[in-house]
Amino acid sequence: MIENITDYISTLLNIEENISLILYYFLLTLVIGILAFLANIIGKKLVLRGVKKVIIKTATTKDEVFYNRKVFHLIVHYLPIIVVNLSSPLYGQIIGDYIRKGLILITIIITTLVIFRILDSINEIYMQRDFAKGMPIKGILQVVKIVVIFFAIFIVFISVSNTGSAMALLGSLGGMSAVIMLIFKDSILGFVAGIQLSLNNLLKIGDWIEMPNYQADGEVIDISLTKISVRNWNKTISHIPAYKFIEESFVNWDNMSQSGGRRIKRNLLIDINSIDFLTVEQIEKLKSIDILEEYLNEKTHEIENYNDKKPNTHSISNRKLTNIGTFRVYIEKYLRNHASIKQDETLIVRQLEASGNGMPMQIYCFANDTRWANYEGIQSDIFDHLYAIIDNFELLPYQEPTGVDIAGIRFNQ
């Protein structure tokens, strides 16, 4: 057929057969190229528009994800491939075989990209579900992508080579396994780590984690096959190998968020020199504080009864109320009546061992708002109040001497 056409062209244009053959291939390629281009245009204008109309009419939004990910845009590229494939016999046996092998390569590449976009669409649809953050599948889909790539390479090799070469490739896969394990070490370790993290519910997207070894302190924003991304509170991003979360320790604050309470554990340092017994006048003054009135009445009555039973009612060993003890009770009652403190959680006000920095009065409780700014506001309000009212108990907060204190001493001298 090709010879007849080239002879006709040679006779018609009065040119040599070699030139007429080149002209034939040129014109054939030009015509096939135009047809392939038109097929691509028709696919984009008609097929994609039709698909979009169908997607808009459907009740579900899942198909829109596939459209936005341009899955259908890639599928349209099969149309020009079909046109070229149907026209390949016109080039003859030898050139046609090369064209078909090239088309196989292009088809495999497009198919691989289509599969990748379908997997990305599946992940996007999956992440819209409530439980998706606890069990992300991105790492599993990335493993599937790697498998698809290996299959694609294998199919391409078989398609463009003879049977003997394909068998040789299969025979060499065993020897290549060690190299593959080395190349994809992080991916394999990350995949195993991802399964362990998911099954044990150790980590999910949205968790607040802290990993000091990698300067990570923030929210998990992505869990992939090889790495876990954390947006730190200073707006930087930390990328940590996934398997490191199995090898090393990290703190996950998610349970704190789920419980609805965030711990307050802070010390109020008191000057030991200001600790003393309460006088009768001081007790009467403190009774004006509503939350202390009942306690002071009961306690003074209890102490009086105890002391009356002793032979020497004026002994120095008699029981007396102290300002620091009463202040400790006040703090506890204040927290018990605080609207921003969780009352069903541990609430302790205790004295720690005294040191050169005074007597630490530790407040241990839980705020009922885990949001950072609100939590800090609650904690600050509590200690603002305690520092402001401590003077009513004839107590002094401890503070190391400053330049002003030293200057005051010199001035008095």
Image (cartoon, rainbow, N blue to C red):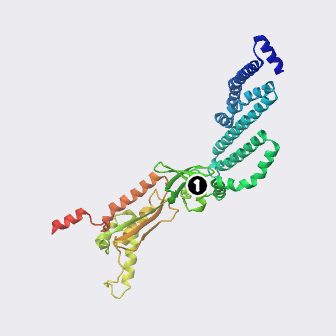
Q: How many marks?
A: 1
> Most extreme residue toward the front, as rendered?
16
- Image coordinates for residue 263, horizontal then vertical, percent: 48, 61
Q: Is residue 329 left or right of residue 169?
A: left
Q: Evaluate whether residue 184 shows in this view.
A: no
In x, y percent, where is residue 38?
A: 70, 22
| Residue 163 visible in image | yes
Q: Which residue is mark 1?
A: 241
Image point (43%, 55%), residue name: 376
Q: Report crowding for label 1: few under 14, some 14 to 19, many 20 or more residues within 10 A (C-alpha).
A: many
Q: Quadrant of residue 87?
A: top right
Name the residue rendered at 48%, 49% in the picture: 236
User: What type is the residue that disc 1 sits on?
Assistant: Pro
What is the quadrant of the C terminus in the image?
bottom left
Q: Residue furthest bottom?
A: 311
Pick the front one: 81 or 177: 177
Rendering coords of residue 331 (x, y %) = 40, 65
- Give me the residue at 46% from left, 56% from top: 340
- For this rendering, which residue is in front, 333 or 52? 52
Label 1, secondary structure: give it: strand
Horizontal relation, residue 345 to residue 92: left or right: left
Tell me the residue at 81%/21% (across/down): 2
Location of residue 324 with respect to 171 vertically, above or below: below
Q: Above or below — where is 63 with respect to 293?
A: above
In the rendered image, which quarter is residue 114 located in?
top right
Counting from the top left corner in percent of width and height, residue 28 is at: 75, 21
Location of residue 400 (image quadrant): bottom left
Q: Quadrant where the N terminus lies?
A: top right
Q: In this image, 113 relative to 335: left or right?
A: right
